[in-house]
Each structure stands twice: as structure tokens, then as C-alpha cells.
Image (cartoon, rainbow, N blue to C red):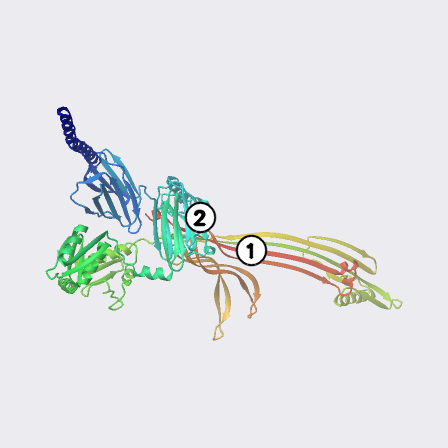
Amino acid sequence: MDIAYRHLSSIKGGRGLMPHRLLRTLSLVLCALFASMAFAADVNLTDVEFSSQPGGRFEVRLDFDGTPPEPKGYNIEKPARIALDMAGVSSKLEQKKFPLSYGNASSAVILESGGRTRMILNLVELAPYQTRIEGNSLFVEVGDSGVREYLKPTKENPVLSAASSKQTNAASNDIVDVDFKRGDQGEGRLVINLANPKAGINVFVEGGFIKVDFDDVNLPERLQRRYDVSDFATPVQSVEAQPSEGGALFSLKASGDFDYLAYQTDNEYVVSVKPLTAEELELKKKEFAYVGDKLSLNFQDIEVRAVLQLIADFTSLNLVASDTVSGRITLRLQNVPWDQALDLVLKTKGLDKRQNGNVLMVAPAAEIAERERQEIENNKQIEELAPLQTEYIRIRYADAREMYRLFGNESGGPEEVSTTSLLSPRGSVIVDERTNSLLVTETAQKLQEFRRVVRLLDVPVRQVLVEARIVIANSSFDEELGVQWGASGINAVNSGEDLLFFGGNTDSIIDSRSSVAQAALDIAQGNDLSEPILAPDALNVDLGVANPTGSVAVGFVNDDVILQMELNALESQGRGEIVSQPKVITGDKQEAVIKSGSEVPFQESSANGETTVSFKEAVLKLQVTPSITPDDRIIMTLEINQDSIGDLVPSGNGGVVPTIDTTELTTQVLVGNGETVVLGGVFRTVDVESESKVPVLGDIPYLGRLFTNTSVTQEKTETLIFITPRILADTLID
């Protein structure tokens, strides 16, 4: 029994030791777990620095007490924001929000939650970014890394073409293909395939166009065109793909009410434009433009000051509340932007806010309005009592008087020029036309404002070289075949008592009879013949060519009869080309005229009966007014004349006056920089076939050719007018 008892006791004792072993095992497991967690989160963020870089970029440097992990990030277009998550990193920074004053950056926020640290960069416009790890530091570079050259692309200027090709070759990405599809819900989908998914892309709306700007991306020439996609029945009517300065630009022309979504999947970038229904349009109008971080508030009968303090702590803003801010409020807001929550609280209690930097001032709306009114009155009184100063402002490029007139409201006589639209009632401006300067008398604040306006307006006007080509090409062909033949003679009849004359016309017969009578008189008097005996003209059919290039003649002559016949022909062919090429350089929106030619005098009668000499121009003239658009295209109002002196026509005074052949074109056209366009042309063809013949005899088959003259005339005239504008680079002015 004793042995059995001890055995039982030992068994009971063993059972009593099991809880201690379990506790010891659990403690070891927990220690290992805590150690692994401590090891996973042993990287701490100790410092952050921000620095500006050339080209509008900025850099963020994050320092850690160990090797930082590779960040995982995403970006948002509206609002423009870059978020980077660093898993297993603990933030030891005392400050959470950092205001930034770099061009494209507004602020940075660093928060820690759930075993990770997130850095949010709030931007004005979305920009590409790059990250790199060097030792215990993480660098984030935001913005374009390349430097864009300011060159005007052109197709015919070799200098600019070479620079443009150099810039294109420097790009590191290509657009492989462009496609457009219609979605199931009637949306238009522009699909752009990239060779490399890393590309800086900016999407924005300008007018009725959705523009997609690719930075540092090549657009092949085969894809540079305007695509008409109106047949797809989507809000998108057309897509224009063109190279831009340092990249490519796609412009989607949309109509109606629409909304768009842009996203990228690997190498494919998609812009989807969806038509809005009436319900979606109404809902969109009711949306609030709140972009703050979301928070949740659930309080019962809490003081308004406490709610304002909570929002200030959440946003890291400094709060200044007026003594009149009081009252209590009950609110339950779930996942609401903090700026919307703040507006709801202020509107509920009749309050208003003003923000100056990172300081938020809250007071009743009436109190803020009264304070601002008093500030305006105080500023006005200070301005009325401020001392006046006189400053001499030299105008470099613009005309001083024209610049003054931009402000309107002139006063004084014709010799005095002053304005009060920009200046205060105490100020004045005097224009010195000799030195093209302005003498401004005003307070120091107004003088600074006036200098700013002059600095913006007094800039060199961009210049345009306009070249016109007027080409007149003509060709002519003439062919003519004619015949001349006749018979004439003198014969005695009635035993020689009478003479028979026959020939081509009665005048020649009369002349022949007179010469025979004179010869008979000379013989009867025994004298020599004083003049030869004339035979009548033998041309019975005169259908010959005026200036033949070839002829064949045959004839028969005896004592009484003359027979003769001549065949003549003419064939001529000519070609001519007249090229007129006027050129002129003028400024943007400034008219230019160039003409060359002569003035033709002519006589005309005045009202009192006197004859005066007037002149009419027969000149080559180019009159143009170019207007450069923001996308470097040129709108031109053109008037082109090509006049020449024509034929001479009789005048009413007994003399002759010349006619003026005129070719004139007046139009307005939009042309790309360096491109050539045909403004218009005239093509004229003249075909004339004529036949002259002796009645009846000319209709006899075969034999009628001896009584017929035929001619064929063909004339072709073609007139074309070309225009080529080129924007002169600013380096030519410098």
C-alpha cells in the first residue's frame, strides 16, 4: 500500500508541474514573437529634408537608422498627389505636415499607421517621380529630369529640323500604336501603346478638348495625323496626334456633357470618355469640391471650440478663434473630408474662416465682414495720405502712347495724355514721345503695380516671314491651212474693137482698163509707153494664211491669161511659266504690304470738261496680317494681286488705252508653322476650230479643199497661288 501511495503521489506531483512548463514555453514563444516584431519594425524614420532642383524639380531625402525598405507608391490625378508606403518603418518625426514652396509642390504629409509609414506629396499638377536608396537614405525626385529646348518645329527650316530631330532622338520612350474603340456604354476609348510603361503623362481639359501630354516620348511620323472618329457615336468627335516640345500631345475633341477617366495598365494607356446622363449630370453639379483627408466625428453636445481644436490637430493647422465663438453642437460625421466637416460646423453656428498660411482664423461671419470692411477703409485712407513719387519708366518695345491708351479713360486736351483707370485719383501719367517713355506720379504701391503691368506688356512682338508664290503656266497650239488661187487676163472681142477684162475684183479691172487706154494713146501719138500695162488681180479665192511657215505655188502665163495657185500652212506651239515670289516679314497681328510693278497713265475728263491724266496700278502685291495662335500656328488675312498690262483698246478721245489683266485673291487661312498650302487657282482652256470657205464650191467633196481655209487653236492657262508662313525664332531677335 505504501508503494502504491508513493506512486500515486509522484503522479500527482508530476501533474502539478505541467502548468509551470506550459508557462515557460508560452513565455519563450511570446519573446520570440516580440523579438521578430521588434526586428521587423526596427527601422525608424529619423529625419526628412526637402531641396529644390533645376528644371522645376524638387527632391525629398528620408534618413533612417537602418537600411530602408523599397517603397511602394501610387499617384492620383485629381487632386494631384503621390503616396509612398514604407512597410515596417516607424516615424520618429515630431512634425507631420511640411508646407513646401517649390513650383509644383504645395505640401508633404508623413503619417504612421498599422506598422507602416506613408508619405503623401500634394502637388499642383501630377508629375513623374523616381526613387533610389543610398545607404540609410531614401531619395525621391519629383519632376522631369530632362531639359526642353525652346525651338519652333518646322518642316522646311533645316536649323530647326535638325534641332527637332536631336530632341526626338534624346527621348527615351516611343508610342508604338494608337487605337480608338467604342465601349459597351457608349464611351469612347483611346488606347495608346507605349514601348516603355515609365512615362510622364499629364491629362487636362482645355476648352472642349481633353489633352493628354506625354513627356519625353517619341511620336512616329506615321501616327502624326488627325483621326475623325465621329462615326463611332461617342462624345469624342476627333483625335489629333502631334509632336510637342519634348514629347507628344493628343487632343480629343468632345461634345456634349461628358466625363473622362485616364488610367494605365502596363504599356497601355487608356483615356475613356463617357457621356453623362441627366441624373449623372445633376449629381455632378451637386458635388462639393472638397479634397481634404477624411475623418469621422461622433459627439453629443460638444463645445464648438473643442470641435475646431480637433480639426486643427488633425490637419496640423494653427487655430485662432475669436472670443465670440461659443456654443455647443451635436454631430455625427463618418468618413467625411475635413474641409467639408469644418464648413458644416461653421455654417451651422454662423461662423466664417480665413486661412493665412498654416494659421486658421475663425470668427462670426458678421465680425469678419466688419473687420475686412474696416481694413479696406484703413487701406484707402493710408493710400490717400501716402506720399507721391515720380518715376521715369522707359518703354523698350511698345509704343508709349499706345500702351497708355490700353488703360482708356483719357482726360485733358490733345497735347495732354493722362489716365486714371490703373492709377489712383491722385496719380497721373505723362507720355514723352521723343524718348518713348512714361513719367508716372503715384504712390509707392501703385508704382510697383504699374511696373508689373509694363513688364508684362512691354515684350517684343513675335515675327512671321510670309512667302507667297504665284505660278502662271500657259501653253498654246495653232494649226492653219489655206489656199490662194486666181485667173486674170485681157482679150480682144468684136474683131478687136472691144477688150474683155477678167480678174479677182473690179478695182483691178478698172486700173487695167486705165493703163490700156493710156498705152493706146501713147502708141497713137508715136510715143513710148509711159507706164506698163497692168493685168487684173488674179486672186479669185484668197483664203491663205496670214504668216505661213510654209507654202507651195504654181502658175501659168501667156499673152492674154495669168493662172496662179498657192497652198500655205502654219503650225506653232508654245509654253510659258511665270513665277512671282514676294516675301515680307511682319510682326504678330501687324499688317504688311509689299508691291512691285508700274502705274499705267490714262486720260479722263473731269466735271468741268478738262482732260486730266490719272494712273492705274499694274503691280504684284502682297498684303497680309498674320496672327500667331498659342499652338504656333498662323491665321493670315491675305490679299494677293498679280496685275499685268494687256491689249490696247481705243479710247473715247481718239487714242488708245491699255487694259489690265488682273489675278486677285482675298481670303483668311489657318496654316501650320513652315507648312505650304495652296490658297487657290484658276485653270482655263480655250479650244477653237474655225473654217472659212467659198459658198457652194467649198462643199464639193475633195475639190472643195481648194476653196477652204481651216484653223485649229488650243490655249491652256493655269494659275496657282501658294503661301508659306514661318515663325522667326526668338534667337534671331536676341
**Front residue of this view, candidates 418 and 5:** 5
Crowd band around label 2 with a 10 angstrom C-alpha radius: few (<14), some (14–19), many (20+): few
**Residue 629 seen in render:** no
Q: Earlier in the sequence, mark 1 or mark 2?
A: 2
Residue 434 image offset from top left, x and y in percent: 27, 58
**Front residue of this view, candidates 660 and 232:** 232
Label 1 and label 2: CA atoms lie apart by 42 Å
In the image, is 220 to the left or to the right of 105? right
In the image, is 707 to the left or to the right of 332? right
List the residue tagged with mark 1: 718
In the image, is 680 to the left or to the right of 107? right
Q: In the rendered image, which quarter is residue 650 located in? A: bottom right
Residue at (40, 55) in percent of width and height: 253
Q: Secondary structure at mark 1?
A: strand
- Kind of residue at disc 1: Glu
Residue 718 image offset from top left, x and y in percent: 56, 55
In the image, is 420 to the left or to the right of 551? left
- Kind of residue at disc 2: Asp
**414 shown above or below 150:** below
Crowd band around label 1 with a 10 angstrom C-alpha radius: few (<14), some (14–19), many (20+): some
Quarter holding the N terminus?
A: top left
**Residue 398 seen in render:** yes
List the residue tagged with mark 2: 179
Residue at (32, 42) in percent of width and height: 147
